[in-house]
Image (cartoon, coloured by chain):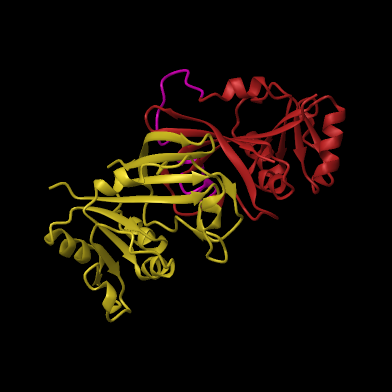
Chain colours: A red, B yellow
Amino acid sequence: MEKKNSVYIGTSLDGYIADSDGKIDFLDTFTFPEGEDMGYYAFMDRIDALVMGRVTFETVLGFNVPWPYQKPVYVLSNTLEQLPADYEDKAHLIKGPLKEVLANIHKQGHSRLYIDGGSTIQSFLKEDLIDEMIITTIPVLVGGGHPLFGEVNQTLIFECANTQRFADKVVQNRFLRIK
Amino acid sequence: MEKKNSVYIGTSLDGYIADSDGKIDFLDTFTFPEGEDMGYYAFMDRIDALVMGRVTFETVLGFNVPWPYQKPVYVLSNTLEQLPADYEDKAHLIKGPLKEVLANIHKQGHSRLYIDGGSTIQSFLKEDLIDEMIITTIPVLVGGGHPLFGEVNQTLIFECANTQRFADKVVQNRFLRIK
């Protein structure tokens, strides 16, 4: 079965996924027509599971909304001992080197993965483990914060496979790793 | 006459205009059909003059190619005393606070300006003096270097007015400042 690691994320025009206070208000700069999901549900339909870091997991819990995922969630953490009891049937704690982590997830029958969270994405990119990135650029300059991208161990070449605007304001580009 | 400050620049997917050695080799990652200028000449046709910093000016001189500009060039520098004699009819040294600099350039009848060079663009953005940015994203991650964007004094909101791919690899987005 095809193995694929995908990113679906929004950033500011200057490449931040959260501002210097950790806030993501800039994602709501523009309003969109009712029901416009910018391809999110179609993307979710074609993944088997999510992989996110502890910080992203705790951020989602902090939203105080019903658990938003229909697919299994793997929470990467080398520090957490266990997940909150309420989430034991929804999320799985997983630790270790990324390639081992991936092998374990694949063994569960989950091949097409949504990789989420800033430091998780950066860790995957450092090991050249990202195949696809769907990046929605909210065209605002916030000036600083938590960047989507960090250091890499080698130049990684992608191609822009699609580009699409939403509400005449926002642009979403889909990049595929070329090897 | 309409006054407009525009940027036309290429960056890596992680937002760098030069890598950590100051090199821009990544701009040549992909080859394009003969004659594909990615809108550069159409852009040059609709500007009256260029404004660039000393570093960009010296970089252009270092290319050892014939002087590439048909339009007047203003070189912003608070340290240079004069430009090399060979360039006296091609480029004009200009110094002082940006708003005064702009007023002086406008007095020469040059209203539609191409603002070029990393630190010059960042200075203009800090004073919210950029109206349009045409950014060609070369989808490679270089991991570090000279970023296009820096700190801003306030969140600046743009809209994506156009998006276009070239050679199925590269994407060019045009952003307009919304006020």
Q: Is residue A25 magenta?
A: yes
Q: Position of residue A167 (x, y in %)?
A: 39, 27
- Which residue occupies 42% across, 68% down? B64
- Which residue occupies 41% across, 51% down? B9
Dividing the picture into quadrants, the one containing residue B61 is: bottom left
The magenta stretch is: A13-37
Question: Depth check: A102 or A4 in front?
Answer: A4
Q: Position of residue A149 (x, y in %)?
A: 60, 49
Q: Position of residue A165 (x, y in %)?
A: 43, 29
A161 to A11, vertically: above or below: above
Question: Depth check: B88 or A14 in front?
Answer: B88
Question: Depth check: B30 or A37 in front?
Answer: B30
Q: Position of residue B104 (x, y in %)?
A: 16, 65
Question: Depth check: B41 or B99 in front?
Answer: B41
Evaluate whether residue B174 shows in this view: yes
Answer with left or right where residue B168 lies relative to residue A31: right
Evaluate whether residue A148 shows in this view: no
Quarter containing the N terminus of chain A = top right
- Which residue occupies 30% across, 54% down? B128
